[in-house]
Amino acid sequence: MDFDSLLDESAKIHGHLCPGQVLGVRMSMLGLKKICIKEPKGKDRKNIIVFVEMDRCATDALQSVTGCSLGKRTMKFMDYGKMAATFLNLKTGRAVRVIAREDSRDKAKEYFPEIENKYTAQLEAYKIMPDDDLFNIMDVNISIRPEDMPGRPLSRVKCENCGEYIQDMREIHREREVLCKPCAHGGYYMPGTDFLLPRAVQKSHNGLKIKSKLWIEIEGEPVFGRGRRFLLEAIDKHGSLNQAAKEISISYRKAWGYIKAMEERLSVSLVERQAGGKNGGGATLTNEAKEFLKKYEALENGIKEIVDEKFKRIFER
Ligand SMILES: [Zn+2]
Ligand SMILES: [Zn+2]
């Protein structure tokens, strides 16, 4: 396909025509040519892997022109924040890294001095500028691991903490445990029902934010709050105090201490322990505990919304 139809197609998939599409299409055409791939979506489709170094407009163009994608495991996202990509020919081993030149941004203006808008000038100029003005090229060696190749997953194991399954050797072996990455290092999510807007999209309201916290006391002594709620919920989920303590990142001793204190203050039994077993015995919630948890959840789930709503009403106008 020629440049114009490739650009048309990529702008359609991306949703708009932008300098990034032009650059991405040009980058892909150059990269493919250098590694001698003529039909990336046809007979060569199994012979190519592309490493992209940014998640920006041009990335969509790279996908559109090369036909490589994350889902097919033929596109690898390297989060470097650079306008660069590497094209690898799996048949010959030849790989080139194509890097957008920083000075091409200013040069674009020289091509179309009459166009006032910087982006329009770039968009038009990137279409006609010679490759050498747009890109630097580097021959590179790529070693790709078997577990990163397209094809069936090479392995499938269970995380001993959360019980979820992990494919393709992404698990972490720690001492005698097998863990998923979020359980081992912490993930991008936290179990919970707060549903706070991510910090990146929160409006700041001059930096004002509302926090609300709820706990239950008996004679001035705290008995139950969100932390205890998560502990009981985790025990209910895992059937083990040990696993529950792990999930909320406290020690077994501390978890047991909390339970004892709650039971004393509330004068009910909350957790039944069964001796023996791999994780030091199972633990289940008593009916009283489940009942209490249900009531507390009902109480807490409503409160945050009411407080947020009131905050909005008073501070956001
Ligand atoms: Zn764009
Ligand atoms: Zn896990």
Image (cartoon, grey):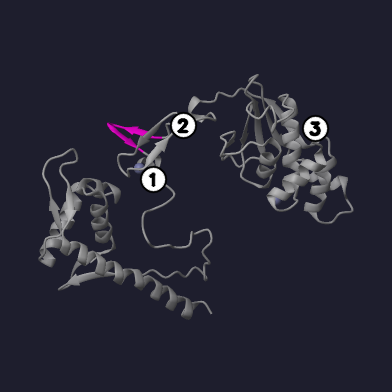
Mark 1 Cα-neighbour bin, 10 Å: few <14, some 14–19, many ≥20: few
Tell me, yes or no, whether the highlighted magenta stretch contains residue 243. Answer: no
Relative horizontal placement of residue 282, taking residue 181 as reference (left or right) = left
**Three-letter amino acid code of the residue under disc 2:** Pro
Residue under pointer 3: 132
Assess mark 3: CB under 8 A from ligand 1? no
Residue under pointer 2: 153
The residue sitting at 66% across, 37% down in the picture is 67
87 vs 15, nearest the viewer: 15
Which region shows up in magenta? Answer: 171-179
Q: Provide residue 255's location: percent of width, then percent of height.
A: 20, 52
The residue sitting at 86% across, 45% down in the picture is 110
Rendering quarter of residue 180: top left
Q: Who comes first in sequence, dot 2 or dot 1?
A: 2
The residue sitting at 43% across, 78% down in the picture is 310
**Three-letter amino acid code of the residue under disc 3:** Asp
Q: Is residue 178 above or below residue 228?
A: above
113 vs 137, nearest the viewer: 137
Q: Provide residue 166's location: percent of width, then percent of height.
A: 40, 37
Q: Are marks 3 and 2 in contact (CB under 8 Å)?
A: no
From the image, give the main secondary structure of the stretch colored magenta: strand
Q: Who comes first in sequence, dot 3 or dot 2?
A: 3
Residue under pointer 1: 186
Q: Is residue 107 among what the camera can see?
A: no
